[in-house]
Amino acid sequence: MLQQLEEAYGFIFEDELLSEINQVGNLQFVGAGETIIEIGDYVKMMPLLLEGAIKIMREDKDGDELLLYFLERGDTCAMTLSCCLGQTKSEIRAVAERDTKIIMIPIEKMEEWTSKYKSWRNFVFESYHTRLSEMLDTIDTIAFMNMDQRLMKYLQDKAKVNQNETIAVTHQQIAYDLHTSRVVISRLLKKLELDGKIKLQRNSIEVTEL
Amino acid sequence: MLQQLEEAYGFIFEDELLSEINQVGNLQFVGAGETIIEIGDYVKMMPLLLEGAIKIMREDKDGDELLLYFLERGDTCAMTLSCCLGQTKSEIRAVAERDTKIIMIPIEKMEEWTSKYKSWRNFVFESYHTRLSEMLDTIDTIAFMNMDQRLMKYLQDKAKVNQNETIAVTHQQIAYDLHTSRVVISRLLKKLELDGKIKLQRNSIEVTEL
DNA sequence: ATTCTACAGTAACAAGGGTTACACAGACTC
DNA sequence: GAGTCTGTGTAACCCTTGTTACTGTAGAAT
């Protein structure tokens, strides 16, 4: 575990902090598709992402869903962070996008480390900053882009976090993530295929224009 | 200044910190409509809002605008905060919604206070938390609501931050804030008036249903 | 009073995207 | 091989929102 911890965070954290994380952190493996945090959960651990990818979803009262962004190696969930500190319920859902390895840190340690380690403070601030930027990007996407552009961006992002230009996904799943209907997605995907940007197969899509 | 500082932040900050702010902070008055931060600005001061209200806008490359949220007394701009710490350019525009009184804190102090005062750390974390929630709310609004609902919410929010159920605004200005066209707004406003939720006058709107 | 300008009302039309309905194809079960 | 289930393709239709165009009017400027 220490080796992966160093790979992901070694440049940022002091050795002393790394070894503390190594001691108190709880290593967990999450299979692709498994839910890590559900909306309304009280969050008592903060995740550090060692390997894999996590997708962060929003859902309103009517059950309408929307993909917010992906987390990758070296990220943490600033939402969760925020929940830990404020002792509030999670406002988002976190689902493993692929097989994922995380270290869970108990919240008690967070307070402690915040006073003790400058590198930890910087990491937390940095995480908030990244997350705010990511949210701005999400807002830009839904406010300023049409569905065909959003779809193309979605496919490119998804290919990137899965490190594979062929994505295993159904049209219905895309429709959920982008908060639209399956028919709309099928229609637009066909158009993108005719434009030569992707190739469609059953249960998967190859993104040729990355 | 100290009195207003205490009113706005007295319950959160230690006396020692309050008096430090009082010493190094730079009190500023901004008239309604004036721009406080422009997109692309390098931000070297962090604002604490004593009185008034600030609206935070996003703009894309094509000049399309969108209102993100309002700041009120006791708030700070977490975006700015984020920019200060990361030394990056502002990704948003801040405009005084009404006559506003703020204290500007030089960024050097921020680092210092973060190690020195627990209350300051908590305030910063709390601000980030509030801002993330606010952004989620914005996303919900544009992702899940129709234009008529968004418009009604806009009018209610605006009435609230201006502490007046009569809002001085033109249809065109609303169209900019909601990133749509003037005709659409006029159409929907008329419908809201027929539903008895608002009363329309030239250059102003009275919100009867708050 | 006349002119100018910004603001508001409204009609007619276009486009994007959501809905319903149905056909068909691959994959799996029995 | 027949039946079933899930995923995909597509047409037809509708609603919301965006666009263009024109009218009227309040208020300021002259």
Image (tube, coloured by chain):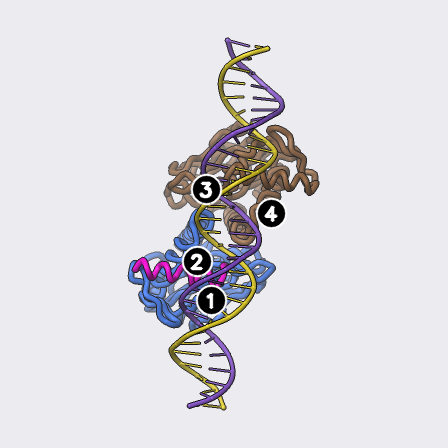
Chain colours: A brown, B blue, C purple, D yellow
Q: Amino acid at mark 3?
A: Arg
Residue A183 percent location from the top left of the image: 53, 37
Pointer 2 chain: B
Within-10-Å neighbours for mark 1: few <14, some 14–19, many 20+ = some
User: Circle 3 marks a residue in which chain?
Assistant: A
| Chain to which mark 4 belongs | A
Are the two marked residues, 4 and 1, in contact with CB atoms closer than 8 angstroms? no
Q: Position of residue B116 (x, y in %)?
A: 44, 55
Q: CA distance from mark 4 to mark 3?
A: 20 Å
The amino acid type, in three-letter code, at marker 2 is: Tyr
Mark 4 or 3, nearer chain start = 3
Q: Is there one chain holding both mark 4 and mark 3? A: yes
Disc on res. B172: 1
Horizontal relation, residue B167 to residue A129: left or right: left
- Discs 2, 1: same chain: yes
Is there a contact, CB below 8 Å, between mark 4 and mark 2?
A: no
Give me the disc on residue B189: none
Magenta includes A44?
no
Q: Quadrant of residue D19?
A: bottom right
SS at mark 1?
helix
What residue did someone put label 3 on?
A: A58
- Marked residue chain, label 1: B
Which amino acid lies under the numbered mark 1 shown in the image of this protein? Gln
Depicted B64 relative to depicted A154: above or below: below
Residue drawn at x 53%, y 43% is A69
The local crowd at label 4, few if under 14, some if 14 to 19, many if 20 or more residues have their Cα within 10 Å, is some
**Can residue A185 be seen at all in this image of the molecule?**
yes
* Residue underneath mark 4: A149
